[in-house]
Amino acid sequence: MPDFAYTARDLTGSKVSGMIAAGSQREALALLTKQSLFPMEVRDPLPKLAAGKSRKVKPLLIANMFSQLSGLLRSGVPLLRSLNVLREQTSHSGLKSILSDVHDQVEEGSTLAEAMAHHPRAFGEMSISMIRAGGEGAFLEDALDRVSEFTEKQQDLKSRTIGAMAYPLFLGFFGSLIVTFLIVFFVPKFADMFGRMRQKGELPFLTDWLLNFSEFLNHWWWLGAGAIVALFFFAKGRLQTPEGRIFRDRVLIKLPIVGHIFLSLSVSRFCRVLGTLLHNGVPILKALEISGGATGNKVLSGAINQAAENISAGESLAKPLASSGHFPRNVCEMISVAEESNNLENVLTNISDDLDKRTWRQLDLAVRLLEPLMLLILAGVVLLVAIALLLPVMKMSTSI
């Protein structure tokens, strides 16, 4: 049972403050009245969160909360009591505050989906739509289980992708540091040795270019750093515009080797979200709107929105997806057959599972190829520096 902070006056008119355990704010008021106290203020000591101002909570923590809430409801525990149990047992302050706010809103008459919609940083639109459909269709427990399972799968794929890319990124970062150290601190030591050849114009082009580049980094590094920072913020600003995001997403899916991986990941998310929403009774137009945003790719989202317009006009889903040219042909064929057999939600989930497996194999292969490729590039740059420094030495030896 939660504790409420109160401020009241006793029979003598003196102000008293303290904490009282009660199931709700209304019950706390009643208990204070029974104690011959006149309540002035009764509040939950946990901070209230304004709509849209909630803290971001880790997806796995949210998935675990959904699973526990489903288990409590299946066991016959009422919703308010279930939310209260979850609030008391969680050790995460952000989630505790969110659950407290959701509990109070449900107690005041809001549905679970409406209460969660006030915290978009913790509960995504897909989760809220599925929970709303589950509440309206009397299958809330199943909807919560599916949201939990989907969240866990998405987080697992994200973690595996980040883990696979960690070593290549680490290798590239430290390789860049080594090359920069060579050019900035090691190469300048040869400038005096090659000074006479440089004055006579006898220095090889590669060596002369390397020495000039080294001098630039030593004396004008701030200019280069400023240009890189300015370019970064300019590109960041441009990519945040609608046109820039479309350009970025189009380039990502067209990149050699990794472009197909980005495309498969986005299509997989679309199929899984759409299949899960349809399975839980969400209307197809609303499901397409949510799943289009879940792709994380503006180019695919535009194709999905166009497909939604065609469906409103009475056409199928597979045809506009195929005509967009962004969805794999085999995926469109399976969607077309699923529509004819009225088994779209199950087929979409199967497509997503298959795409995830194939994407992981492709990602693993790409990472395996990327590691030796980065080593070769690093070795090539170091070899180029060594050749540039050895060419004048060999030329001087020949002259002698």
Image (cartoon, rainbow, N blue to C red):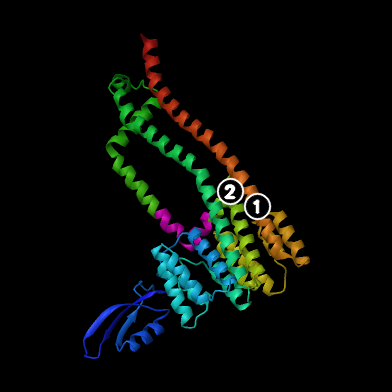
Q: Residue at x 72, y 68 (%)?
A: 316
Whether residues under marks 2 and 1 lie with C-beta atoms below 8 angstroms apart, the answer is no
Question: As drawn, is 336 to the left or to the right of 236?
Answer: right
Question: Which mark is drawn over residue 400?
Answer: none
Q: Residue at x 59, y 65 (%)?
A: 145
The total number of labels drawn is 2
**In magenta stretch: residue 245:** yes
Along the line of sight, the residue nearer the viewer: 121 or 219: 121
Q: Is residue 205 visible?
A: no
Specify start and end residues of the magenta stretch as a single range. 234-248
Question: As drawn, is 158 to the left or to the right of 39?
Answer: right
Q: Is residue 102 visible?
A: yes
Q: Which quarter of the rendered picture does the C terminus lie within? A: top left
The disc, 2 or 1, on the residue closer to the chain's N-terminal end is: 2
**In magenta stretch: residue 19:** no
Along the line of sight, the residue nearer the viewer: 216 or 37: 37
Q: Is residue 394 above or below residue 125?
A: above
Q: Which residue is mark 2?
A: 259
Percent coordinates x, y for residue 147 in the rendering:
57, 65
Q: Which residue is mark 1?
A: 355
Report the Cα–Cα distance between label 2 and label 1. 14 Å
Furthest residue toward right: 341
Prevailing secondary structure class for the magenta stretch in the rendered image: helix
Along the line of sight, the residue nearer the viewer: 283 or 109: 109
Q: Is residue 23 above or below residue 187?
A: below
> How many other residues sit within 10 Å of disc 2, few (<14), some (14-19) or many (≥20)?
some
Residue flagged by tag 2: what amino acid is it? Gly
Q: Which quarter of the rendered picture does the N terminus lie within? A: bottom left
Give SS at disc 2.
Answer: helix
> How many other residues sit within 10 Å of disc 1, few (<14), some (14-19) or many (≥20)?
many
Q: Is residue 148 above or below residue 177?
A: below
